[in-house]
């Protein structure tokens, strides 16, 4: 089966569905706002805008993380609402809601359309039948006689003794979540046995289990909520359907796609991700060698181990050859020094690298058509592990290094936030970059213009990220090891903060372009908004950045053509490249939009 | 003796099974274990099992009546809902069990199952296939088996 069919496409949300969801459970707008308490809720929040990790996400929070208490509270609220509107007992409302997967509106609709039928289906009797009016009654399970007032019955009036009820309820609870739909033990009777009976007769342990099943059901059977898939995490996430990106970030800090529950993969859609994951598992045997962390140095052939996050590798002395881990080409061809166009991300160019051992191996693989996939998979996997490394480094930074640095450089920790910001940016960018390789793999071969534009944007983003990662990883080391002149440290601050903001811009461009299917790449006007700190606001939003001066497809084509020529970083004559931060700027700007340096 | 703390319910059920047996059904507890019953069901008239006497064993687990009794055919029988080992596919012996059901109701249900085989909910795939493909022939086989294995000859 095609996994795409099974999922909502992140981009192709049908309006039908949106309507369905907006109406669901919210009979009147705003009524639910109170439930949110001081949680972010559905408000348009912008209080995180100085946190770079949130910048690539939407400012509008379209989801809420729920803890156990929140879940119970919401559930109780829904039960109360149904109980009030339908004038039924709370336990009856609970039975109804469970049956209709906790959709308040569905319960209301069905009930008011055909109450009699609904009652029959879920086992709620309209008139309560009393137990037979005798002094002593026989329990239908243990066959013993008991005084009438010690017996209990559901509204159907079938009497059972206390201990048989307790055993009956306990057996059902220990059988699993089916206990939420328990019926009277009498086999001819379908009357519901609900929360009130459980609460009045089950043991404490069973009552707690029952409550857990109720909470679980409220999350799992409810179309609006899902558990966070992070191992050991007990939060659930409630999502407002039809409200843009599916990426959510749980309070445990794990980011995932609410739709397909894979890790967050914006800007790539769920279908592509599912195909890619399937492909990876099919090819996993062929790809094992890629995950090995050692490659021969392209110059001296000694095995070199990758033990850092950035892809810029320097061979051990005396060789000291600087090369790119991904394509094994000399780093000089990647960096800003030569102004060379970053092309390591492009599949075609990888073929043209010199005759290194590794390349020879690659050529061999081309014979069995794995080469193309290998190219994308290796980059996907490398960014994955690089992100992992960055996360570890970020943790180490927060746990000890910041304190040490604060000591060495006599700076208050509050002044060192730029370093944390840089690392958060790296972590997020590695994630985005990784998924763009899955995107690239499935981007149709003969969509040349799109492909070239995509590769240009991806290359820009990747090269920016490598510079940022290298700076955060290696240059920081100097300041950790010894006291340095304040001026040096301030320069470092300027550089790292600049690289962070430049990289953020590149990635915002990339994400925007991919989310619009590379068709309509909006000018970087919103970039100016989200990046007040580094960008001169006066820069005109109409003619910023590479090839974004005109409209639509011709612009894309133009960009593609000039990128093929490989002429420095500039795409055409209407832009210039900042020498300091390598950001591209429109000709009309006299100052760099990212670092404000004069041209 | 392990039967000393037998629940009153089981004693009552046993007494009633012995004093007023259901037509075509006999069930008597074993001497050593009052939870183990030797059962005999007569093949219902108008069914391929007519004329046969089918032996079954029935065991009441510790959790009974919260859990259903365990029942199994000992006599070989050609039936789409009964497998080679004599296990029976019957909803009240599984998820539709209720503690208000009894040994008597279970055995009556099994008797009814002999009258109305249900090849759409099969336990024995081959027999069910046979039943669906050629019912006349399958019924013949069932009759043949009844003669061979269930007539005490
Ligand atoms: Zn009882
Ligand atoms: Zn009842
Ligand atoms: Zn979580
Ligand atoms: Zn997804
Ligand atoms: Zn070397
Ligand atoms: Zn490279
Ligand atoms: Zn600049």
Image (cartoon, helix red, strand yellow):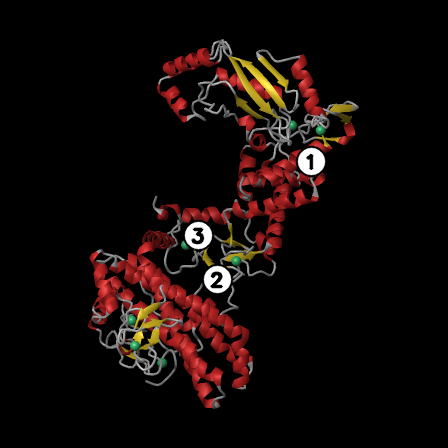
Task: List the residue tagged with mark 3.
Answer: A259
**Relative to A520, is A39 on the left or the right?**
right
Task: State the image coordinates of residue A593 (x, y, percent, origin top left).
Answer: 37, 78
Q: Nearer the viewer, residue A568 or B15?
A: B15
Q: Residues within 10 Å of mark 1 (few under 14, many from 20)?
A: some
Give SS at disc 2. Answer: loop
Mark 1 → mark 3, Cα distance in angstroms = 41 Å
Q: Residues within 10 Å of mark 3 (few under 14, many from 20)?
A: many
Q: Quadrant of the N terminus of chain A?
A: top left
Q: Residues within 10 Å of mark 2 (few under 14, many from 20)?
A: some
Q: Earlier in the sequence, mark 2 or mark 3?
A: 2
Q: Earlier in the sequence, mark 1 or mark 2?
A: 2
Q: Is residue A185 visible in the rendered structure shown here?
A: yes
Mark 1 → mark 2, Cα distance in angstroms = 49 Å
Task: List the residue tagged with mark 1.
Answer: A166
Task: State the image coordinates of residue A11 (x, y, percent, origin top left).
Answer: 37, 54
**Relative to A329, is A177 on the left or the right?**
right
Residue found 61% across the figure and 19% down from its top: B104
Q: Earlier in the sequence, mark 1 or mark 3?
A: 1
Give SS at disc 3. Answer: loop
Q: Nearer the viewer, mark 1 or mark 2?
A: 1
Task: List the residue tagged with mark 2.
Answer: A60
């Amino acid at each position: 089966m095609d996994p795409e069919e099974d999922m909502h496409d992140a981009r192709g949300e049908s309006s039908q569905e949106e309507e369905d969801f907006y109406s669901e459970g919210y009979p009147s707008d705003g009524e639910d706002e109170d439930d949110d308490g001081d949680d972010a809720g559905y408000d348009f929040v912008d209080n995180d805008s100085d946190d770079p990790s949130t910048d690539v996400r939407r400012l509008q929070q379209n989801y809420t993380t729920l803890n156990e208490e929140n879940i119970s509270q919401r559930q109780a609220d829904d039960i109360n609402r149904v109980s009030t509107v339908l004038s039924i007992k709370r336990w009856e409302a609970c039975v109804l809601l469970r049956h209709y997967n906790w959709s308040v509106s569905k319960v209301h609709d069905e009930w008011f359309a055909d109450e009699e039928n609904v009652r029959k289906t879920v086992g709620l009797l309209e008139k309560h039948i009393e137990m037979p009016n005798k002094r002593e009654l026989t329990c239908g399970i243990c066959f013993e006689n008991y005084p009438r007032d010690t017996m209990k019955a559901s509204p159907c009036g079938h009497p059972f003794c206390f201990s048989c009820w307790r055993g009956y309820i306990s057996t059902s609870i220990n059988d699993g979540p089916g206990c939420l739909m328990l019926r009277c033990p009498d086999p001819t009777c379908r009357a519901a046995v609900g929360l009130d009976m459980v609460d009045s007769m089950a043991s404490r342990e069973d009552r707690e289990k029952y409550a857990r099943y109720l909470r679980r059901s409220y999350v799992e059977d409810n179309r609006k909520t899902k558990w966070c898939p992070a191992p050991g995490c007990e939060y659930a996430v409630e999502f407002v359907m039809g409200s843009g990106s599916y990426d959510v970030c749980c309070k445990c800090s794990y980011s995932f796609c609410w739709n397909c529950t894979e890790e967050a993969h914006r800007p790539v859609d769920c279908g592509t991700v599912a195909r890619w994951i399937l492909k990876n598992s099919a090819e996993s045997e062929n790809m094992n060698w890629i995950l090995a962390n050692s490659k021969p140095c392209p110059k001296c052939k000694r095995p070199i181990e990758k033990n850092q996050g950035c892809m810029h590798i320097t061979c051990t002395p005396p060789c000291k050859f600087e090369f790119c881990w991904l394509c094994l080409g000399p780093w000089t061809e990647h960096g800003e020094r030569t102004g060379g166009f970053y092309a390591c991300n492009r599949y075609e160019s990888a073929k043209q690298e010199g005759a290194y051992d590794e390349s020879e191996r690659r050529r061999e693989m081309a014979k069995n058509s794995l080469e193309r996939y290998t190219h994308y998979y290796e980059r996907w996997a490398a960014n994955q592990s690089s992100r992992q490394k960055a996360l570890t480094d970020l943790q180490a930074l927060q746990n000890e290094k910041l304190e040490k640095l604060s000591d060495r450089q006599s700076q208050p920790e509050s002044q060192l936030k730029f370093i944390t910001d840089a690392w958060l940016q790296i972590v997020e960018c590695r994630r985005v970059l990784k998924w763009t390789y899955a995107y690239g793999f499935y981007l149709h071969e003969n969509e040349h213009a799109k492909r070239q534009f995509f590769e240009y944007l991806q290359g820009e983003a990747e090269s920016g990220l490598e510079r940022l990662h290298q700076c955060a990883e290696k240059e920081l080391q100097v300041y950790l090891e010894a006291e340095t002149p304040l001026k040096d440290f301030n320069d470092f601050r300027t550089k790292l903060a600049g690289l962070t903001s430049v990289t953020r811009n590149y990635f915002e461009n990339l994400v925007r372009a991919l989310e619009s299917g590379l068709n309509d790449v909006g000018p970087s006007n919103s970039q100016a908004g989200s990046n007040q700190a580094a960008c001169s606001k006066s820069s005109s939003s109409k003619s910023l950045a590479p090839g974004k001066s005109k409209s639509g497809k011709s612009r894309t084509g133009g960009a593609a053509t000039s990128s093929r020529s490989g002429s420095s970083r500039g795409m055409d004559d209407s832009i210039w490249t900042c020498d300091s931060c390598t950001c591209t700027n429109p000709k009309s700007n006299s100052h760099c939009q990212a670092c404000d340096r004069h041209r | 003796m392990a039967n000393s703390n037998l629940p009153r319910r089981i004693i009552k059920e046993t007494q009633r099974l012995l004093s007023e047996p259901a037509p075509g059904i006999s069930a008597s507890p074993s001497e050593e274990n009052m939870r183990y019953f030797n059962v005999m069901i007569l093949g219902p008239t108008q069914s391929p099992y007519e004329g046969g006497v089918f032996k079954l064993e029935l065991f009441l687990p510790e959790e009974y009546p919260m859990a259903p009794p365990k029942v199994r055919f000992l006599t070989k029988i050609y039936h789409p809902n009964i497998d080679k080992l004599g296990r029976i596919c019957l909803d009240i012996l599984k998820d539709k069990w209720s503690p208000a059901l009894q040994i008597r109701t279970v055995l009556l249900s099994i008797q009814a199952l002999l009258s109305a085989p249900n090849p759409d909910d099969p336990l024995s795939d081959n027999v069910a296939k046979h039943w669906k493909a050629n019912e006349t022939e399958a019924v013949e086989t069932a009759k043949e088996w009844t003669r061979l294995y269930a007539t005490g000859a």
